[in-house]
Image: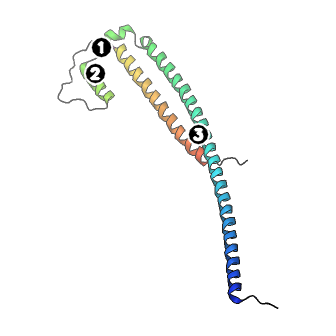
Amino acid sequence: MTLIPWPYRWLALVLLAAALIGFGWIKGAGHVQAQWDAAVQKQTQQAAAVRERQAQATVKVVTQYVDRVRIVRETGETIIKDVPVYVPVQADGACAINRGFVRLHDAAAAGELPDPARDADASATGLALSAVAGTVAANYQTCHENAEQLSALQAWVREMGAAKQTPSPTP
């Protein structure tokens, strides 16, 4: 019986161990790569689903916003058109708008304090009451349009957050 000398046995064992380690390394790397690829693909699908939900939410919010602003504009234009009905020409002559009112109104519209150095002149400006009513109605119309814009922006932000939170359907 021929025995294989110990140095060759050790060499064979080392080579076998190296082969097994190399085989395990390659198989493990392939398995990890497959897991990585699957995770990347899943994330890509989830991101696409979130983008789709966000796009749908954006269309929904914008459509609602456009409809509401159209209604606000139509209502505001009707009110402005009806100023002569509610503030007749006789009221224009009966009520004098003084310069102090005009200065105070303009300062309030600009969001500033009125200039205290200027006197609150009580003299008439020649400004008709119907013109003041029309300007105030137009300002309120703009205010309501801005409020609708803010509401739509808030709804859009909520929808974007909900689109990110909603789990995507699994195929």
**Helix, strand, or loop for circle 2?**
helix
Relative height, residue 102 to residue 29 (above, below): above
Residue density around tag 1, few if under 14, some if 14–19, many if 20 or more, within 10 Å: some
Q: Which residue is mark 3?
A: 54
Q: Which residue is mark 1?
A: 127
> Which residue is the extreme one toward the left?
117
Residue density around tag 2, few if under 14, some if 14–19, many if 20 or more, within 10 Å: some
Kind of residue indicated by mark 1: Leu
The first of marks 1 and 2 along the sequence is: 2
Residue 106 pos. (x, y %): 29, 25
Q: Which residue is mark 2?
A: 102
Left or right of residue 158: residue 135? left
**Point 33% across, 27% down: residue:** 109
**Helix, strand, or loop for circle 3?**
helix
Query: Are the two marked residues, 1 and 2, in contact with CB atoms closer than 8 angstroms?
Result: yes
**Point 31% across, 14% down: residue:** 95
Residue 32 pos. (x, y %): 65, 62
Residue density around tag 3, few if under 14, some if 14–19, many if 20 or more, within 10 Å: many
Query: Are the two marked residues, 3 and 2, in contact with CB atoms closer than 8 angstroms?
Result: no
Indicate the quadrant where residue 101 lies: top left
Q: CA distance from mark 1 to mark 2?
A: 9 Å
Q: CA distance from mark 3 to mark 2?
A: 47 Å
